[in-house]
Amino acid sequence: MIGFVRCGADSTMTIMPTRVPWSDKLDSSLGRAVNAKLLESSPRSLVWRVGLRDGSRVIVKQITVRGGAGEDADTRYARETAGLRLAGRAAAPAVAPALLATDAESRVMVLEHLEQRADLCAPVGPGLGTNGDWMPGYAESLARLHALTGPDDAGALPAWSGPTPADAASFLALAGTLDVAAPPGAEVELAALVERLGDTPYHALLHGDPCPGNDLHTATGVRFIDFEQASLGNGLVELAYLRIGFPTCWCAMSVTGAPLAEAEEAYRATWRRLTGRDVPGDLADACAGWLIRGDALVERAHRDSTDHLARVPVEDFTWGYVSASERLVHRLGVVAELARDHEALRAVGRLSEAMALRLLERRPGLRPLPPHSARPW
């Protein structure tokens, strides 16, 4: 998450260097920088709002060597710039800030300065956003982003990486630790799920982390920022965020009922309008894929380091304001419901329902995820 003039995201960070990396190359292409303010950002980058001599403002983002979680800084820089260039294909309204200039030597990109809509910035409580319905605009822009690429773009970005056999094994091991017997066929279904998710040759432009805070609700529509994890794959793995509780996000939320139906239909209608066909793939598979990934229980810096599903029975660790068990119970319930009418996931659905009940028995104080209306802006 980076500081593109979000509501309340204008704090300086005095522990970091404040000198903006404005090179002679940028000076010659964009003009002289006359002031800069360091903004809040993730550990993986430094971000400034920079004023230029002509009175305009831009955002400068520099990828740092810290917090890469498996990828070096040069690789992350190349991935983000490639994602932004692909996103820049969108006709008006745009779906991402324009990439105005780059300086690869310093891993710097200069981006269009964007403003969040002022009417979204009035909080309804400590740390909470407004009660306005932000979901349809988010879903429509997500579909527009996904529809920008196709088979001809293969290789422009890494392919999306789905769950592995090790994830399936960890999920079954968690069931055993919870004293929940796996129904006959569950292991076979999980193996087939991993194979289906890994073998689908889709080429949608995936953001990689479409979380609240990485979606800016501007006067001209929703634009996504922070393309460090951009990839090509099946758009349903990101549409699934709405049902499965925003799995890569610190602010997990629950979307149900009419708001969920409206947002999903906005996505599907937009996709059909742009591509002339229905959305490919299986939403139940996408949700089940997020369920069995233990690394979707922790922030990026701690992924790929341990079996996080195995930690759940021992400690109910927290990421953001939601615990791992609360995230997991929500995901289990979603998959259990979707799998009731899904021939290829029925045993996994029964297993998920039993695991959710067992976790609630062990930890009766678990809370449901906050509703989408309580998103932090």
Image (spheres, rainbow, N blue to C red):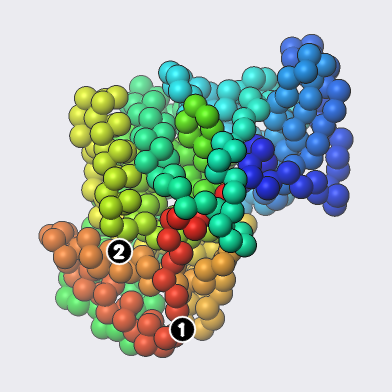
In the picture, measured across the screen, residue 100 lies left or right of residue 214, that is: right
Whether residue 231 is situated above or below residue 321 in the rendered picture: above
Q: Residue at x 30, y 31 (%)?
A: 270
Whether residue 280 is situated above or below residue 307 in the rendered picture: above
From the viewer's side, name the closer residue of 163 and 284. Answer: 284
* Mark 2 crowd level (few <14, some 14–19, many ≥20, 10 Å Cα): many
Mark 2 residue type: Val
Q: Which mark is residue 116?
A: none
Mark 1 residue type: Gly
Q: Are marks 2 and 1 in contact (CB under 8 Å)?
A: no
From the viewer's side, name the closer residue of 264 and 176. Answer: 264
Give x and y (percent) for residue 371.
Answer: 43, 61
Q: Which residue is mark 2?
A: 334
Mark whose residue sits in front, 2 or 1: 1
Give x and y (percent) for residue 126.
Answer: 62, 62
Judged from the image, the secondary structure of the residue bearing numbered disc 2 is: helix
Residue 178 shows in the view: no
Residue 66 shows in the view: yes
Give x and y (percent) for residue 120.
Answer: 55, 43
Q: Which residue is mark 1?
A: 365
* Mark 1 crowd level (few <14, some 14–19, many ≥20, 10 Å Cα): few
From the viewer's side, name the closer residue of 349 and 37. Answer: 37
Q: Residue at x 19, y 70 (%)?
A: 347
Residue that extends furthest to the top in the rendered view of this protein: 28
Task: State which tag comes first along the sequence, 2 or 1.
Answer: 2
User: Label 2 vs label 1: CA separation?
Assistant: 20 Å
Q: What number of labels is visible?
A: 2
Give x and y (percent) for residue 349.
Answer: 23, 68
